[in-house]
Amino acid sequence: MKKRLILIVLVVWMSNARAIFAQIDFTQYHTPASLASDLASLAANHPATSQLFTVGTSVEGRQIQGIKISTNPAVDDPSKGDVIFVGLHHAREWLAAEMPLRLAEYLLTNTDPNLQACMNNLQIWVIPVLNPDGYAYTADANGYRYWRKNRRDNGDGTFGVDLNRNYGFEWGLNTGSSPNTYDDTYRGPSVFSEPEVAAFRDFVAARHDPKAMLTYHTFTEQFLRPWSYATSDPPGKSTLEYIVQDSIARIDAVHGESYGESIGYLSSGEATDYFWNQYRMAAFTPEMRPATGGLDGFSPPASQIIPNNEENLPAALALIHDAGCRIVWIKDYPGDTGVEPSAIWVGNGWSHAFWVSPDIWTVPATLVGGSTVTLNVKVHNDGKIKKGAIVSAYYTDPRISLEFPNPAAVLIGQQTVNLPPGDTTVSFSWTVPTGTNIWGEHHWCVGAIVMHPDDRPLTTEIQLSSNIGGHNFETVDAQAGARMLAVAITNHLEAAAEYEATINREGLPRGWEVVIPPLPPNPKPDRKALLLAVKGRVLQPGETVVQPILLRIPESAKAGTKVVIQVNGVLKPLMPGKRVPVGNGYTFEIHVQECKPAKSN
Amino acid sequence: MSHRAVRPSALLRTICLLLACGLSPQPFLGQEPRSLTNTTQKSQSASEKVQGFFRIEVEDVTEASLVEQQLKIRPALVRDRSLYYYGNEETNELLRKYGYEPMQMNPEDVLTRVVRVIHKGDEEDLSKTGVTILLREHGYWTVRATLTQMRLLGRLGYQVEELGRREPRPRQVRIVVSKREQVAEVGAHRVDIYSAAKSEKGYAILGGAFDDSIDELRAAGFKVEILADPPGVIR
């Protein structure tokens, strides 16, 4: 009897142990049912660190499921960054579902303390299949293995919309999608017409701090960055390319597969373009195995699943590392501890003046056109020595709406340096331009970026990345009386945007007046503004305006007084859905001079 | 106030189609039941009256999306600078408040169906009706036609069949181009490019395309080789 009891206990323990330690079988392709089952088992076996979630419902009513991986998966933690991995926009690309499933399994079973440390700062969302209807159709004996789209009944005798042509950025271009319902690249009747894509858009919009995304596809072995809709350069091209090249090297190091970085054709209404434009979150498309082929390239032998997963894992882990662990960084404001975002728009201004990095300064401090100055960038290294770190410095007109790098910023220099633990100052020789900025002043602002393969910036927005710092600061000598200051604002977004500027009047001495006069109204009413009930000035993409700021210093102001005036600027894009405010600010330090007696004739 | 776009049901349109073209209902017998709520042709609620099919001009896709989001007018179709919708006077009045000028359209001239046309005469005769030929198959063509064109086909004695489960499949094609920029050019002719590998003569593109796309490519000077269908394709 006792032996039997022991045996039963042993059997129960072993079955539990098998459940806990069982590995997902990647020697064969999953079916939609076995994939859902394995995803559920994964969550059930790791209840403390994972939880299933539903993104939304497909056009045929199937649930789009994912697994959230976090130290407290039941709570949506606003203090953590969000990293998203999504597979199978296109139904026939089965490897693109296997990879995210394997990634989820790896993240939940690894014991690497360095990776765990980064994961602790993140909420990781893995959605293996965004297109469950199409997936089911490809797996159905009465379906079609090479089906690409979802299963929307187009109402005209045809089925399906290409989900990766249905996103709301540059949708509708015939160069990268088709208007014809029967085509495999049919973009849908309107933007976000498909419930799968709309649900995914809303899911990302609901995240507190979306930092990075990989959207898995097959095939041709490429690691793609925005833009997909055009051959023109996106803002932050060099940052995106750095990640692409680094990811390609990581993939190559596993099995020697040499991924490329360009697919050669355009695709519009595509996911990564939308998310980069909307959130400036690093978004990439790995087009995985095989390198070449016809339709059969979408159904490589099952023996390819494991090596494909293995070689794509390091690029995904690097992204998690970048999003979750800060190693090399630049302060955004004097009290910055490196926490990102360093500031958020709180309705009437930014929570911190993140454009006054104390880690960026010139010697001498006053810039004289044509003179050569030293631009210093102090970089903090919280980790071990980082060899081959790249520090880049830029200058630009003193604008609100800075991002680095951006097309308007000019590269001062780029240095590859070894960063020991602690602080290192990297110096650049900079010949200040002799010309004037956009409104005729000899004043410039500077920005800097630090990156290393172990810590890459995932955005171009200063406040969203500890790898980026900016110094938008001007010292103004002024006397009692009226004085006009000016800042420029450029709409660097791809959409028209509402512009708003505010003054932080805290600390403004009694008697001082600062007024931001409204800009002249738009020459012609903007219908998007009307639809959104926006009353402020709207800037079209690429438009720059100079915002005057009227300053009145009272006669009572004593010479030598220093007063800081902080201007906050924001652009709110005229877009449907979540209107993510972007921008930054400008700090003037007013030095009161003694009044000079008026000259008499 | 809520303004919902309403559309005639797919069933209603299908009946119209059958009447217009003298179609036999036979092809529908093998068809999967469609979920009307999930189609782009949403069913009409009894309380909502459709008065027509309209078009407004929008600046771009973003504006079309804002119309949908802010005014709750779901587009039937957005193409170029046109937003088409099913609406009534209430809908149109709302749009006018925002400066739009709704224009009544005939959906039969705008919306299309993809159907099979059994061979009769030569292709030239068929093309004169203005339909787009997607596939030239043994015994039939798969065409895209407006409802007006379909009525004409019926009058001309063509036998027109609904596709039902017989969904059109693109052909597998191979196109060799000498320059990399031409890969994008091929893509712009609606080829679903599977891969574009460097070859001795430039780049060998493998992709999927319908015959209308293949015609376009050939007219543009590309040499298109049609490959064998993969397993599972029945024509």
Image (tube, rainbow, N blue to C red):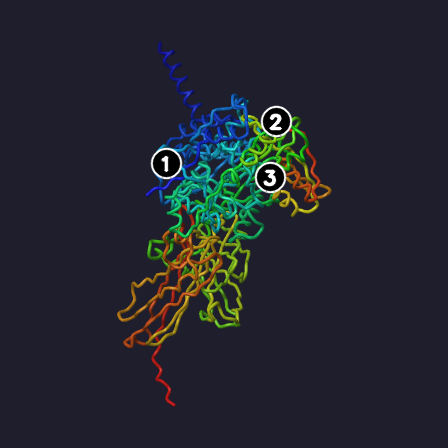
Name the spot of residue B210 as percent of width and height, x first: 62, 35
> The residue marked by circle 3 belongs to what chain?
A
Looking at the rendering, which quadrant does residue A174 occupy? Answer: top right
| Mark 2 secondary-structure assignment | loop
Q: Quadrant of the C terminus of chain B?
A: top right
Disc 2 from disc 1: Cα separation: 42 Å
> The residue marked by circle 2 belongs to what chain?
B
Disc 3 from disc 2: Cα separation: 27 Å
* Residue sitting nearer the eye, A269 or A327: A269
Amino acid on which disc 2 is placed: Val
- Sequence-first disc among 2 and 1: 1
Amino acid on which disc 3 is placed: Glu
Left or right of residue B120, residue A138 in this image: left
Name the spot of residue A285 as percent of width and height, x first: 53, 42
Image vertical order of residue A527 relative to residue A39, above or below:
below
Q: Quadrant of the N terminus of chain B?
A: top left
Left or right of residue B176, residue B90 in this image: left
Amino acid on which disc 1 is placed: Glu
Disc 2: CA contacts within 10 A as few (<14), some (14-19) or many (>=20): some
Residue drawn at (38%, 71%), measured in percent from left and top? Answer: A484
- Marks 2, 1: nearer the viewer: 1
* Residue sitting nearer the eye, B186 or A200: B186
Residue A321 visible in the snapshot: no
Residue B101 visible in the snapshot: yes
Which residue is disc 3 drawn over? A221
Which residue is disc 2 drawn over? B233
